[in-house]
Image: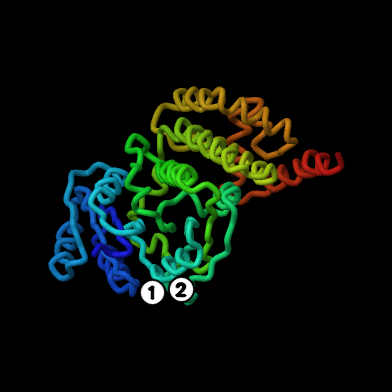
Amino acid sequence: MRPAICVVVPVYRAESTIDRCVESILTQQVPGGVCCVLVDDGSPDRSGGLCDAWARRDARVRVLHKEDGGVSSARNAGMAVADAEYLVFLDADDALRPGALAAALAAQRDHPGSFVVWRYSTDPADPAPASPDARVQPASAMVRMYLDCLIAMPWNKLYRADLAAQLRFDESYTLGEDLQFVLDYMAKLQASQPGWQFALVDAPLTFYNCDTTGTSLSTRYHSDYCDIWPQHFAKLNAAGRALHAPAEDLLPLHRAELTVLAEGVADILRRDPASPEQRRAKAARALRTPWLRDLLRTMRAEKNYSPYYLPVWWKNLHWLFAVAESKRTGSPLYGKMDWLGYYLFLGRRRRE
């Protein structure tokens, strides 16, 4: 009989955290049982051997060894062999709270047909107990949940394995592929089960990024950042429209999109390895895309202000960089521009 939940863990340079991660999985007491698939993605350290040691000690552990293909490739390999009713993803430097999977499964049983999503904690000493208590949210709340940092990642969700098996993480992306996968999963859910809802578990069931060794790649510079995120945002907006996200949720989403793009442009000016002239040319190109033009027009029609709006509208790299640096360093300029925009734009919209 297949277990209730299979946890898929991509493993790369995780020798300092993999034991804690796997132990947090195997100590879960889950009705129907739990197993895990560890995918050693060509890790050059001792991670692969540590995974094999777990497989020798516990029959619930399966290990795959493959050449380094990236986290999406590893997750796809793990999904291909996972055999369970439900699927959970976990990164090798993260951990599950005791009782997490039982709570997620209980929330699923209490709210059949719902997509179970849970909060997470960055503090491994967080004493909050695992609880299956969940608040039902309509599918149209997806944009708001994205803004609350609950949608973009794959590892705080309980997936139906039969639906997830029809999908793959897009290995062509260097970042943001997790959001694409979650949006694709929700589209599958909508097609198979119209009227589905979220069951949001408020208890933080996952300890996120427990690694304190400084080996995370999350802050790595991505040269194609300003090319990739417009694609993700276009898909996110399309999903929001399909799920009838309310207009009041789209306003902060559009501001967030402009912030991501503007700060990506500032990052080109700050960190791109090209010459200063090439950096400026690349940053200028990022401000001339049709997607950005349409976003600015939409925000103008919404009377939807951001401190980045005018620097981007006027394609003024010097001003844009100054605003981004003021936000990054906590100087007063960003706050003053935000207040001014609120007074001139948001206040006017309310008066109208």
Query: What percent of the width, then of the height, locates residue 223?
Result: 40, 33
Q: CA distance from mark 2 to mark 1?
A: 7 Å
Tell me residue 106's x, y (percent).
44, 69
Q: Which quarter of the rendering shows the N terminus? A: bottom left
- Out of 210 and 173, give the one closest to the viewer: 173
The vertical placement of 62 against 241, above or below, is below
Q: Residues within 10 Å of mark 2 (few under 14, many from 20)?
A: many
Residue in the picture at 68% in, 39% down: 306
Q: Residues within 10 Å of mark 1 (few under 14, many from 20)?
A: some
- Any mark on residue 296, and which? none
Q: Amino acid at mark 1?
A: Pro
> In the visual, does 324 lie left or right of 89?
right
Comparing 315 with 168, the one in front is 168
278 left or right of 258? left
Can residue 6 be seen at all in this image of the molecule?
yes
Instruction: Out of 198 and 174, give the one closest to the viewer.
Output: 198
The residue indicated by pointer 2 is 130
Q: Which residue is mark 1?
A: 98
Q: Quadrant of residue 313?
A: top right
For the point 26% across and 56% down, the residue is 83
Q: Is residue 147 visible?
A: no
Find residue 170 and report its horizontal and vertical position in percent: 35, 38
Q: Amino acid at mark 2?
A: Ala
The numbered mark, 2 or 1, whose residue comes first in the sequence reads 1
Left or right of 115: which side holds 342? right
Indicate the secondary structure of the residue bearing disc 1. loop
Tell me the quarter of the picture where residue 338 sits: top right
Instruction: Please name whichever residue, 164 or 193, is drawn nearer the observer in this view of the structure.
Output: 193
Residue that extends furthest to the left in the rendered view of this protein: 56
Query: In percent of the image, x 53 and y 52: which residue is there?
Result: 196
- Tell me, yes or no, whether the two marked residues, 2 and 1, touch with CB atoms within 8 Å: yes
